[in-house]
């Protein structure tokens, strides 16, 4: 399932969300400009290596990506869900919220992969936090979603609560399945980082003072 857009209007211009997307794109283009040997060093230097964690990498790793699909997927989800969370938090609290969610995701990954020497990069954990906050604040919002059923493609509207619960369940299931992997130094998706970021976002949005936004519907939907 690929979310296309949400029905929750934003009352403010999402300047911080746009800035985060721009920084991620700029850093990725810089990564691509490096020769392979320097790019590998760059990722290892600024990505999270659980076996020997450099504290500043907890922040820098959020702005690195492993490929175009990784970057585009993350930025697409941030664009869909981030504007509304920025709207209710305000710019500065949103920046703090985003970084704290990313840090929580990094901590979860480090705890669950303590012996790994593989650098971990990506904004997924921080964006998962944005999604967790969205589920708490806008559960009734509808998400226009592209779904694939065998050879059929269809666009439907799904209540945000159910879509995001499904997404979280998929991360947990995939993470548990991944635990059976014998080699901690084999690369892959940091599933539990997503879970950690999502749960952090749910908790933080309840702790931080927000502006309330409401959206009402008269029709039924799935």
Image (cartoon, rainbow, N blue to C red):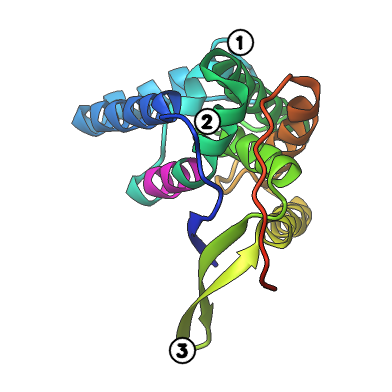
Q: Nearer the viewer, mark 1 or mark 2?
A: 1
Label whose residue precedes the other's in the sequence (2 or 3) = 2
Q: Position of residue 81 (x, y in %)?
A: 54, 43
Q: Which mark is residue 205?
A: none
Residue positioned 39% across, 25% down in the render: 15
Q: Is residue 191 magenta?
A: no
Q: Which mark is residue 151?
A: 3
Q: Nearer the viewer, mark 1 or mark 3?
A: 3
Q: Main secondary structure of the magenta part?
A: helix
Q: Which residue is mark 2?
A: 119
Residue 32 picture quarter: top left
Magenta part of the chain: 70-78
Q: Could you tell whether 107 is left or right of 130 in the image?
A: right
Residue positioned 60% across, 60% down in the render: 142
Q: Is residue 28 above or below residue 78?
A: above
Q: Residues within 10 Å of mark 2 (few under 14, many from 20)?
A: many
Tags 1 and 3 touching, CB below 8 Å:
no
Q: Residues within 10 Å of mark 3 (few under 14, many from 20)?
A: few
Q: Is residue 222 among the parts visible in the rendering?
A: no
Of residues 11 and 176, which is closer to you in this image? 11
Q: Could you tell whether 2 is left or right of 93 in the image?
A: left
Q: Residues within 10 Å of mark 1 (few under 14, many from 20)?
A: few
- Find the distance from the CA under tag 1 to the CA under tag 2: 13 Å
Q: Which residue is mark 1?
A: 55
Of residues 106 and 210, which is closer to you in this image? 210
């Amino acid at each position: 399932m690929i979310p296309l857009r949400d029905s929750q209007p934003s009352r403010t211009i999402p300047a911080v969300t746009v800035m985060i997307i721009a920084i991620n794109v700029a850093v990725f283009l810089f990564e691509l400009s490096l020769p392979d040997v320097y790019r590998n060093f760059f990722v290892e230097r600024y990505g999270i290596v659980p076996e020997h964690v450099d504290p500043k990498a907890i922040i820098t790793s959020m702005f690195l990506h492993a490929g175009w699909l990784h970057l585009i997927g993350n930025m697409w989800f941030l664009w869909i869900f981030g504007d509304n969370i920025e709207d209710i938090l305000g710019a500065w609290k949103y920046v703090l919220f985003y970084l704290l969610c990313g840090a929580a995701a990094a901590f979860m990954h480090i705890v669950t992969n303590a012996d790994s020497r593989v650098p971990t990069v990506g904004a997924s954990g921080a964006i998962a936090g944005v999604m967790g906050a969205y589920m708490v604040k806008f559960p009734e919002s509808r998400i226009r979603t592209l779904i694939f059923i065998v050879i059929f493609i269809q666009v439907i509207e799904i209540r945000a609560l159910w879509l995001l619960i499904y997404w979280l369940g998929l991360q947990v299931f995939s993470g548990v399945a991944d635990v059976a992997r014998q080699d901690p130094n084999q690369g892959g998706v940091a599933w539990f980082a997503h879970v950690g970021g999502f749960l952090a976002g749910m908790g933080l949005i309840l702790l931080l003072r927000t502006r309330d936004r409401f959206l009402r519907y008269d029709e039924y939907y799935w």
